[in-house]
Amino acid sequence: MEEDWQDRGEPSGRQSPKHWALGLGRGIRKRLLGDPSGISYGAADFPYSATQTLSSLHSRQEQTYDADRAMRIHRTASSAHTRAYSRTDSIMLNARDRLHTQTKERGANQAGDFRVIDTINETSRYLERENNEFISMREQIAVMYTVLTVTGLCTGVIGALLDDAVEYLTSLRTGICTSSFFLTRHLCCLSTGEGSCPDFLLWGGQSDTKSYMANLSLAVIYGFFSAFLVKRFAPYAAGSGIPEIKAVLNGCVMRGYLSGWTLVVKILGLTLSVAAGLNLGKEGPVVHLACCVAFLTANYFKLFRYNETSIRDVLSCACAAGVATAFGAPVGGILFAYEEASTYFPNHVLWRAFFCATVAAIVLRWSNPFFDGSLVMFRVKDNVEWYWFELLPIAVVGILGGFIGHLWIKLNLQWMKIKMRNSWFRRSPIIETICLVFLTVSANWVFPFLRQTNSSILSTLFTGCSSEDMTTSSAWSDLLCHHTRKPELIIILAYGVIQKFLLSALTFGSRVPAGLFIPSLTVGSMFGTLVGMGVHTIARSYPEFFLFRDCTSSTYCATGSVYAIVGAASVLAGVTQVSVSLAVIMLELTDQLNLLLPLMITILLAKMVTNFFGTPSIYDSYVHMKRYPYLEPGAIIENELADARRIMSKKVICIPATGTTIGHLEELYKATKTFGFPIVEDLEKKRLVGYLARIELKVALQTASRHPGVNANTLVEFPKDYDITSSFVDFEGNVNFGKYCDLFVAQVFPDSPLSKVYALMQGTGSQHTVVVDGGNVVGIISKKDLISFIDHSEDIPRKYFL
């Protein structure tokens, strides 16, 4: 500790009471407002102003890179002392910690902030990393399904506990059950009804002002601790997690993002943030939690520990289990993992995802989270009907829903850019969260209908009413079903659409665990209900019009629940641009198979509108904004004249196939930070033979060191005709590294269009492409180089993939 004080230029001796008090004040300020010199945004932190030039960004990045990497490594520690170090603090970490970091990417094929795996060659290399131990097929299958079973079980349990904890803490903001303090308001009043419940004690009594103050106070406490836990212990626990999962499944290695500490903090923070009443949901973060469970479970087995490709197969299955748990939609979860999350989804992964989602659904069904013995979250009790003339207003709902989603993405991204460029937001994530809680609770308090949770609002609007003469004991059903209260309902819904649209856009991306599924569904359901009310009014006003003649025999034409459901789907489709899986999820959410066609139409039109505006989904936008090394399928490179020569690195470190010594390779490994080295016939012409990945070179050198007689002067060979019967050390004493050399090497010509290079690297999952001219190596292109060229014109300053 004394040495740290000296390094920072501060006195190490005994301090005076004045200095001690000042230091205590600074410490409290750091805890509440954030460290002014620290990183508050983790993977989303962009501390550079827009006026800086690219060269100045490079210089500054060089100065702070070791600190950033050391901080991320420190985050992976699962101890009570784990904290997000500031740049000033983390730069003082000892040299031993820095040996585990990677240097900043200065050119192609060099290690950057996040390592990228080579998908194809990764599959065939894990056995060598395990010292060539043989693992039988039966053992592999047993281990795989053990991991999938544990993942499904734990995800289902976590989902059930989250539901119960959120419901209880939300109820606690209103009051407490005097007969059994551990019961929620719904369970406490189950026998007497919500209207008259003497066993439930309201904090404010009959005073609306006191109730507001009590509700707000508890919500602020929840929000404070949620933001504090994330900032203090696990910055990776913030946000939805789906953009990062997409990057991981695309081949990016994000150390610490799936750690046990992140899992614990995200569970606690998510419970508190949702219970605080913020306009966010827990469904997206549950996918992150499922992936954390899968990653931690898989790392107990050697089959996965050194096999990044198999890890990604398990994570794809975990995504399906996460959505199955969050929505009670196992089939929709499988399709979501296939359509949105995973880049590579072979047939065997589909079956495993089916198995994992089934296990999670069984656990969720056993826990009975909705108290009706089913997995349907928003059950519509009556079979809602729709008429053919309603396809026209339903199509209008789809178009407007896609436009709302487009506006929501633009607003949220603009707000994120403002926060990234403003130092106050980086210093004060806790204060930001408290302000959002205050705004949300105050805005919802205007109308009692909006004081419900978003899930309760969805349940009310999805259920709707089947008759105008319907009268129930529920105040909200009375509001929806009575014609005399329609003006009041229109005002409430219009206000709710505007305020939840704005607040959800401001909340998503804050430094607390936050999802966007439920807020988007809520905005869409209120918007759809407004459209349905308009259609119903027109149909009643002109009953003889030929389009409305089918309604004459119906007690209720243009059912509001139909428009609430399709409106919710349209807005969510516009925000996430998910199509097939969203349609299935909505069917499983509502148990209304007869709404399949309206749902397909609205989702299709909403996605077409966002595509017309050229707006990527919110998840792809965040992946792009945070500069993750992710190659989006079907991306278009605007500069069609650019070729491989423009972005390739000409300084390529090659290894000759013959004549290299163990000592030379050891020095090469220590002195460079490249991901791998092309193997060439000789260093003059550099005719390509194969490729040696850095991790394979490390394993090969470790294996060679265990052989007697092998020293620094031992020659190393990379024969092209290597087979499994070849010995590691031949009769001349030379070492054979042929089994570590990758013979599959993605190659392009110098004049190859970058669009073709992009398609090659995206389709094969390669982390690099060797540029050859006449079979000779002239350059190399990494995945990060390609992404850097594509997004060089963006208005967010570059920080090299964070």
Image (cartoon, helix red, strand yellow):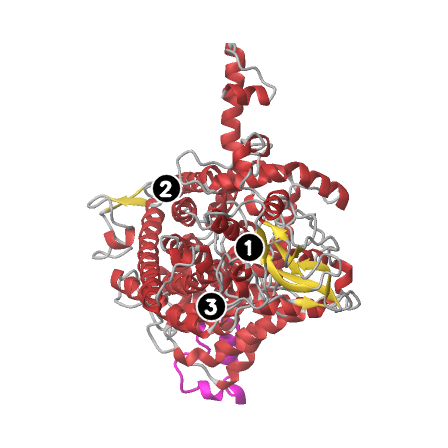
- The residue at the point 25 percent across, 49 percent down is 183
Q: Is the magenta stretch mostly helix, strand or loop?
A: helix
Give residue 643's position: percent from left, percent from top. Answer: 77, 65
Amino acid found under the numbered disc labelled 3: Phe
Q: Assign a secondary structure to mark 1.
A: loop
Up the image or down, 155 lies above or below 12; here it is below
Q: How far apart are the alpha carbons under marks 3 and 2?
A: 46 Å
Give residue 309's position: percent from left, percent from top. Answer: 48, 62
Q: How far apart are the alpha carbons under marks 1 and 2?
A: 88 Å
Query: Closer to the N terminus: mark 1 or mark 3?
Result: 3
- The residue at the point 35 percent across, 65 percent down is 140
Up the image or down, 250 lies above or below 75; here it is below
Bin the neighbour count of mark 1 within 10 Å (Cα to Cα): few under 14, some 14-19, many 20 and up: some
Q: Mark 3 points at which residue?
A: 336
Nearer the camera: disc 1 or disc 3 = 1
Residue 553 in magenta?
yes
Query: Closer to the N terminus: mark 1 or mark 2?
Result: 2
Give residue 187's position: percent from left, percent from top. Answer: 25, 54
Q: Name the residue under label 1.
A: 734
Q: Assign a secondary structure to mark 3.
A: helix
Quarter of the figure with residue 213? top left
Near-viewer residue (673 or 527) = 673
Q: What stretch is highlighted in magenta?
A: 533-562
Near-viewer residue (543 or 165) = 165
Near-viewer residue (206 or 259) = 259
Q: Mark 2 points at which residue?
A: 207
